[in-house]
Image (cartoon, rainbow, N blue to C red):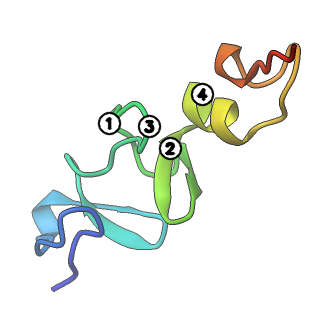
Amino acid sequence: MPKCPKCQKEVYFAERKTSLGKDWHSGCLRCAKCNKTLTPGQHAERDDQPYCNVPCYAALFGPKGFGHGGTESHTFRN
């Protein structure tokens, strides 16, 4: 029986969500930053952690500067 990568408990067939090549509980497949519930195939991954595409992944790992990645990616310099 496969184990959920987040809680390390067994994942039964009826509750399984397959994403990132692993089987998750539906409640465990959440964005690592904002904790939003994700659907398989509709999110991004970095360092084995799932992220929602917008805004979290874009803000954390997308291009920085004006007009890219949302407000969290804006860097102010003195």
Amino acid type indicated by mark 4: Val
Residue assigned mark 1: 37
Q: Is residue 52 left or right of residue 8?
A: right
Q: Indicate whether 75 appears above or below 41.
A: above
Real-space Cα separation, disc 1 to disc 3, in angstroms: 11 Å
State the residue in front, 71 or 25. 71
Q: Which residue is mark 4?
A: 54
Location of residue 2 (image quadrant): bottom left
Residue topped by disc 3? 33
Residue 35 in the image, given as x and y percentages of width and height? 33, 35
Q: Are marks 3 and 2 in contact (CB under 8 Å)?
A: yes
Residue 72 placed where, x, y %? Answer: 65, 20
- Residue kind at label 3, given as amino acid type: Lys
Q: How far is disc 2 from disc 4 in space, using C-alphas?
A: 9 Å
Binning the other alpha carbons within 10 Å of mark 3 as few (below 14), some (14 to 19) or many (20 upward) gives: some
Of 71 and 78, the residue lying toward us? 78
Residue 23, position as x, y percentages in the image: 31, 69
Q: What is the C-alpha distance between the residues marked 3 and 4?
A: 11 Å
Mark 2 lies on residue: 51
Please tell me which residue is depicted at 43% across the width and 51% down the height of the picture. Answer: 40
Q: Quadrant of residue 24?
A: bottom left
Point out the frontmost of discs 1 and 3: 3
Q: Nearer the viewer, mark 3 or mark 4?
A: 3
Q: Secondary structure at mark 2?
A: strand
